[in-house]
Image: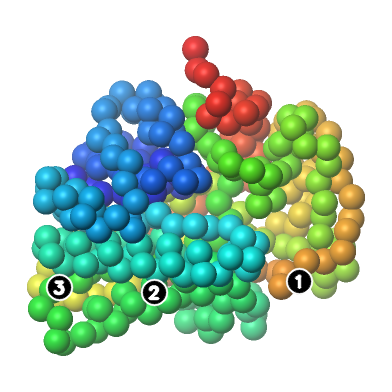
Amino acid sequence: MAILVTGGAGFIGSHTCVELIAAGYELLVIDNLCNSRAEAVSRVEQITGQSVVFLKLDLLDKPALDACFAQHKIEAVIHFAGLKAVGESVSKPLLYYHNNIEGTLNLLAAMQRHGVSDLIFSSSATVYGDPDSVPITEEAAVRPTNPYGRTKLMIEDMLSDLTASPADNHIWRVVLLRYFNPVGAHPSGLIGEDPSDIPNNLVPYIAQVAVGKLQQLSVFGDDYATPDGTGVRDYIHVMDLSNGHVKALQWLQQQDAGSSMCEVFNLGTGTGYSVLEMINAFEQASGQPVPYKIVARREGDIATCYADPQKAQHLLQWQADKNLSEMMADTWRWQSSNPNGYDDPQE
């Protein structure tokens, strides 16, 4: 029996594969490689010393997805696959709704046809939008401000409806993981975040400036109501985040197999760092300067966002252990060893 990891060649997916293998699970990884690389799966095998079954497969391909379930014994699904760039979702909303929603519908239908009940869904703190207060608990209002976040919330609603439906003969056991800002890389430096174009997220952009690929960082606004005027976010090491998926799966498999359930957890550190604090921490970890300029705020950006992770600590027995220095040191090890991402061959 294997754990099906959709989007398992991506940033969070590949690191979670490492943690799942360490926990003793067998894996089946599928990915359409539209914003990831098969090399990441090869490096997961290198790190773990275990072979991983990998299929290049798009969730929009119903026959191929059905064949995957028919040919492999799957005990649970961890669902990462989906388009994830906030800016692109604003300019191409139909692409995001088509890919993320329809792909998930196809996955759920295949699970139902083949009797697979357990699902961990990769959601996002973007579902909260601009919070009324921080830290953000799982009971906070959900009001995403962009199409990407809305696809995450729509999928959450779909899964909630499935688990609540008395007319559905299928037992569904679902965990929704809303995580904050994943950063860092595996400590080996073999896998990390490899944006296919100019990075959308802060830390890979900082790393590419430090390694000389990009000239300077743009800091969007220094007039927020924060200690230094720049936006404050909850950054979590990708290895802590990956471990959260393993803990969620283990917890889910301990629950009553005879009744449907849907539970949501925040995965974050509970601490916020500003953009300028992140730049300073990266410079200290890397020994490299990170030139930046202050520019106007981006529309839709908020001042402060960080998690209340107590529910995950209490029920999943999980907490984020890695500090900001470790996040930055591991990011730099990955970026400096792989200036061109997975295009750099390993010896």
How far across and how far down the image is residue 173, in percent? 22, 69
Image mark for residue 171: 3
Which amino acid type is shown beneath numbered disc 2? Glu
Nearer the N terminus, badge 3 or badge 2? 2
Which amino acid type is shown beneath numbered disc 1? Glu
How far across and how far down the image is residue 89, in percent? 58, 65
Image mark for residue 156: 2
Instruction: Judge whether residue 196 can be spotted in this image.
Output: yes
Which amino acid type is shown beneath numbered disc 3? Ile
Nearer the N terminus, badge 2 or badge 1? 2
> Eyeballing the image, is 113 above or below 12?
below
Q: How is the image coloured?
A: rainbow
Distance between mark 3 and mark 1 Cα atoms: 42 Å
The residue at which mark 1 appears reads as: 299
Q: Residues within 10 Å of mark 3 (few under 14, many from 20)?
A: many
For discs 3 and 1, the disc positioned in front in the rendered view? 1
